[in-house]
Image (cartoon, rainbow, N blue to C red):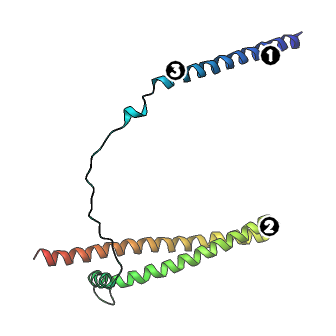
Amino acid sequence: MAPNISKFVNQNQNSILCAAGCVASLWILIYGRTNHKRKPLPEDQIQYCITEKKDKRQQKAHVNAEFFKQLRLLLGILIPRKWSVESGLLIAVAASLIARSISDIWMISNATVIESTIITMHRPGFRKALLRYFAALPAIAVVNNVLRWSIGELKLRFRTNLTKHLYNDYLK
């Protein structure tokens, strides 16, 4: 007897859900029509602004001989001597960028090897490639940190040299 009662309950639930859906769709249709009437017309929102036209053209930056002369002068201020701490930091940045590129290429190839060992289900090769990956992580972290440190130190030294030069020139 219990299954018969549950069939009647499900039929009532379906009719209640159908009625609720019809009422909701009618409410949306009626509300949508009244909502359109409440919106202001686009003509009411138009605002007129009177501005003067600017005929002045802004001069664009050009890379020419004058630019390179100014850059050479600025580099002479930022890097005081040929063999200084700043030039050593520039060499460190260049070397760490090269090392980072090499490590990125190695990481891509090692990830490819790991994926191929997973696909072929070669467990010893997978373990070997995974151990190589974990062994290389500290060296890659050192390269990234040396790059970050040398760039930060170089920015600080450049800023210090430029500030000292400006103080000496303008605040004598």
Q: Position of residue 38 (x, y in %)?
A: 45, 23
Chain-order first, disc 3 or disc 2: 3
| Residue furthest right as drawn | 1
Q: Quadrant of the C terminus?
A: bottom left
**Between residues 70 and 162, which one lies in front from this camera angle?**
70
Report whether 59 appears left or right of 24: left
Q: CA distance from mark 2 to mark 1?
A: 55 Å
**Between residues 30 and 145, which one lies in front from this camera angle?**
30
**In which quadrant of the rendered view does residue 114 lie?**
bottom right
Mark drawn on residue 123 = 2
Badge 1 crowding class, 10 Å Cα cut-off, few under 14, some 14 to 19, many 20 or more, is few
Report whether 61 appears left or right of 11: left
Helix, strand or loop at disc 3? helix
Q: CA distance from mark 1 to mark 3?
A: 36 Å
Identify residue type, mark 2: Arg
**Between residues 123 and 72, which one lies in front from this camera angle?**
72
Q: Position of residue 68 (x, y in %)?
A: 33, 84
The residue under label 1 is: 10
**In which quadrant of the rendered view does residue 56 lie?**
bottom left
